[in-house]
Image: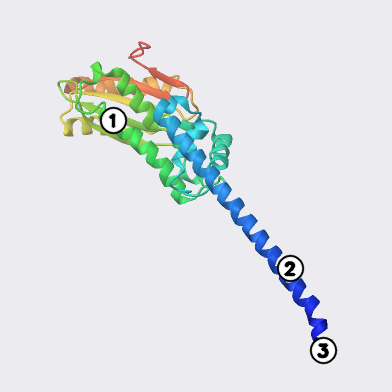
């Protein structure tokens, strides 16, 4: 009898502990469910606002949140989106950032980089479609939008050439050379050779200044004039040389430098 009386308080304490543990577990589960419901409601509110007002109705961080929804189907994407903007500044800078730089941000892995780069690829495909097969000189704003999107944020200089037929329609768009942060080697002979191979009758030269300032340098002007002089006897016209940077673009023809 003595032994049984001694066990009873122990059993009562165990039952009480079990009851409390169940209570904490239920509270934690309810909290997680509440958080999940809150995140679900937040995501739906973002989707509703996007459908009703489009991208203009949303700040950059909310657009980035939505881009990351597929990467983090249950997580809160706002902190990651804000870290990206804190590092790079704008939506455009994030989308155009190098993959290795994106992965320096906490929470960003290969899947997130893929989603971000998919946005850039889709934008370029759309802009390029506005130029291909059309008379380039009659679609000049579309050309500028495309080359700025394609190169303005690149960390290294590169030379792009738009090859045109006799109707001034775009027949090829090629990056000919890639260089360093402040220099691209340009081989005049290669530019002319490729123009002849494609039966192009005109070309537009495009290159970027990673510094952001599109002001043409003396070397840019001299190189352009060399190509103009080499192309002229072969019936290939150089319509323009466009320099793009984060702060805008410059046209050598518009500046009357060619």
Check residue 1 in the rendering and tell me which mark sits there, or answer none.
3
Instruction: Please tell me which residue lies in front, 158 or 88.
Output: 88
- What residue did someone put label 2 on? 16
Task: Kindly give the residue lying farthest to the right in the view shown.
Answer: 2
For the question of whether residue 153 can be seen, the reply is no
158 sits to left or right of 198: right
User: Residue visible at 32% across and 31% down?
Assistant: 160
Q: Which quarter of the picture shows residue 194?
A: top left
Q: Residues within 10 Å of mark 3 (few under 14, many from 20)?
A: few
**Quadrant, the C terminus:** top left
The quadrant of the rendering that contains the N terminus is bottom right
Residue at the image position 50 percent from the left and 40 percent from the top: 41
Residue identifier under label 1 = 128
* Residue furthest top in the image: 256
Residue 196 appears at what percent x and percent y? Answer: 17, 31
Label 1: which secondary element: helix
Q: Are marks 3 and 2 in contact (CB under 8 Å)?
A: no
> Is label 2 or label 1 in front?
2
Residue 122: x and y in percent read 34, 36
Q: Looking at the image, tell me whether mark 3 or mark 2 is earlier in sequence order.
A: 3
**Foreground: 20 or 222?**
20
- What is the C-alpha distance between the residues marked 1 and 3? 91 Å
Which residue is more in the foreground, 138 or 19?
Answer: 19
Give how far across and how far down residue 178 sits, in percent.
Answer: 38, 37
Residue 216, picture quadrant:
top left
Mark 2–mark 1 Cα distance, whole angstroms, equals 70 Å
């Amino acid at each position: 009898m003595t032994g049984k009386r001694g066990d009873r308080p122990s059993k009562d304490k165990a039952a009480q502990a079990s009851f409390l543990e169940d209570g904490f577990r239920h509270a934690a589960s309810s909290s997680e469910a509440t958080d999940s419901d809150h995140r679900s409601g937040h995501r739906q509110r973002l989707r509703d606002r996007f459908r009703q007002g489009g991208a203009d109705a949303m700040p950059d961080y909310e657009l980035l949140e939505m881009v990351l929804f597929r990467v983090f189907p249950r997580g809160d994407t706002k902190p990651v989106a804000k870290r990206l903007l804190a590092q790079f500044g704008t939506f455009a800078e994030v989308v155009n950032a190098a993959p290795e730089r994106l992965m320096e941000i906490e929470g960003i892995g290969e899947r997130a980089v893929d989603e971000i780069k998919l946005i850039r690829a889709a934008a370029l495909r759309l802009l390029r479609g506005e130029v291909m097969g059309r008379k380039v000189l009659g679609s000049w704003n579309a050309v500028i939008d495309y080359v700025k999107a394609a190169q303005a944020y690149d960390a290294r200089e590169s030379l792009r050439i738009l090859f045109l037929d006799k109707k001034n329609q775009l027949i090829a768009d090629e990056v000919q050379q890639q260089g360093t942060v402040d220099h691209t080697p340009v081989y005049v002979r290669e530019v002319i050779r490729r123009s002849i191979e494609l039966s192009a009758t005109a070309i537009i030269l495009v290159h970027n200044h990673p510094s952001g300032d599109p002001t043409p340098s003396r070397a840019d002007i001299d190189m352009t004039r060399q190509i103009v002089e080499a192309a002229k006897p072969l019936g290939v016209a150089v319509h323009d040389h466009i320099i793009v940077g984060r702060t805008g673009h410059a046209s050598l023809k518009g500046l009357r430098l060619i």
